[in-house]
Image (spheres, helix red, strand yellow):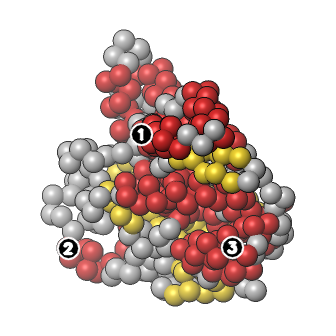
Amino acid sequence: MELRLYDTLSREKRTFVPLDAKDVRMYVCGPTVYDFAHIGNARPVIVFDVLFRLLRHLYGEAHVKYVRNITDVDDKINDRAARDFPGLPLNAAIRKVTEQTGKQFHADVDALGALRPSVEPRATEHIGEMREIIERLVAGGFAYVAEDHVLFSPQAMNAVDSGLPRYGALSNRSLDEMVAGARVDVAPYKKGNTDFVLWKPSKPGEPSWPSPAGVAAQGRPGWHVECSAMAWKHLGEHFDIHGGGIDLVFPHHENEVAQTCCAFHRERMANYWMHNGFLQVESEKMSKSLGNFVTIHELLAEWPGEVLRLNMLKTHYRSPIDWTTKSLEESARTLDDWYRVAADVVPGKPAPSVIEPLLDDLNTPLAIAALHGLRGSDVGALAGSLRLLGFLSESAAQWEGRKQQASGVDAKEVERLISERTAARARKDFAESDRIRDLLAAMGVAIKDSKEGTTWEVAR
Ligand code: AMP
Ligand code: ZN
């Protein structure tokens, strides 16, 4: 069985062959930590977590390295720090913002059942690597210094005819068209209108570091070079998979490829470029102004993390996803059922019927259909497959207990009513037993009678 992955660069599904099967390497662009992460941000986290788990299953846990960075240098972070902590010096305020948001991000994604990546590098801890890449680019004639900035020239890159990729190849754009279509009011220090920033001067009070390439003023890196530096440090000049949301293909990933390949004279940075589609909410683009902007944190107050996870995986990662309450309710009912039948059984091996669709470019909707099939035929395999996909982190009792708590149902009161009803039935007082059943139903509790007695659960 082989793994096939869709590669954005070659625009086709290709068989995955790792550079080194003992050291499979994946980089995914992580969050910029200035605010609560929204449910769109959860999509790459969940999708690439499934890929991480699948790669560990195929190559062994010790042989897969997953790097997801934390961007902690950014204008949005600075703005937030100045707004939320006006009494503190800016650098101390920035530390507060990035620490708090970073912690919140971890709490959120842990609850979604995502494994922690092997390394979570922070941009501020890799300034040395960024400076080195920038120095190499200037020395190689791909970048230049102007007014305390260092800029990358895509045209200088495309002037080299061999050994490097074309600028524009990943996002399938032509540099000539980009040059022709670029805005006219470009910054005066740029030689070409498609040149992008590798390094820029810091404003007074902003975080700053000694600059590369002989620039005297202190400065800070551009966003794109941060990921080139962190990927290089932890995965090398050339690695297997690079992922992120589809919005990052241009300019972020196009520029990462340009920086890394020109700095190290390579034709490739990653062998497979993978991008998740966008998430919208109740058929509308998610935005603060539309009032449909939902954070992971808010959703977790209402739904268990595994419900959010299942709901995300019901759609193939490359398709757009419409996030709706109706679909969440369905996902919750499915998980209630799977918890009841599979959470407490000894897990068997994950079923081939679940693994096979995953091997075909992470076809999670088909894998989920296979889970429904196993429900009636092999609960051991259902349990093993669910665990592989990051579900069943609790026992059936914990799951049910959480549901009761969330619904505000008083379990003691329910038990008391059920024993009253059992007594009524024993004395054949069916009017009374029906009354109690209706009362429980009105409380949101469903009961089921069997030979062993009466069981109950909170109805969704
Ligand atoms: P950001 O913090 O905005 O750079 O985003 C972090 C990650 O979330 C990136 O991989 C983005 O592509 C991804 N992302 C942001 N918004 C959405 C969305 N609405 N749907 C899917 N992915 C998203
Ligand atoms: Zn990145």
Mark 1, ligand 1, within 8 Å: the answer is no
- Circle 2 residues within 10 Å: few <14, some 14–19, many ≥20: few
363 on left or right of 158: right
| Residue at point 21%, 58% (across, down) | 186
* Labels 2 and 3: the sequence-earlier one: 2
Marks counted in the figure total 3
Q: In whole angstroms, how far apart are the C-alphas of marks 2 and 3? A: 58 Å
User: Which kind of residue does numbered mark 1 sit on?
Assistant: Ala
Amino acid type assigned to the residue bearing label 2 in the image: Gly
Q: Secondary structure at mark 2?
A: helix
| Position of 286 relative to 445 (above/below) | below
Q: Are marks 2 and 3 in contact (CB under 8 Å)?
A: no
Q: Residues within 10 Å of mark 3 (few under 14, many from 20)?
A: few
Q: Which of pointers 3 and 1 lies earlier in the amino acid sequence?
A: 3
Q: Which residue is identified by label 2?
A: 181
Q: Quadrant of the N terminus?
A: bottom right
Q: Is residue 415 above or below residue 54?
A: above
- Residue 126 can be seen in this image: no
Q: Is 364 above or below relative to 284?
A: below
Amino acid tagged 3? Gly
Q: Looking at this rendering, what residue extends furthest in the front direction?
A: 428
Q: Is mark 2 within 8 Å of ligand 1?
A: no
SS of the residue under disc 3: helix
Residue furthest toward the left? 184
Residue 156 vs residue 133: left or right?
left
Residue 460 picture location, percent across and down: 47, 49
Distance between mark 3 and mark 1 Cα atoms: 31 Å
Label 1 residue SS: helix
Can you give x and y, in whole percent of width and height, for residue 25 in the image?
Answer: 70, 65
Q: Which residue is the site of mark 3? A: 376
- Residue 442's label in the rendered image is 1
Between circles 2 and 1, the one closer to the viewer is: 1
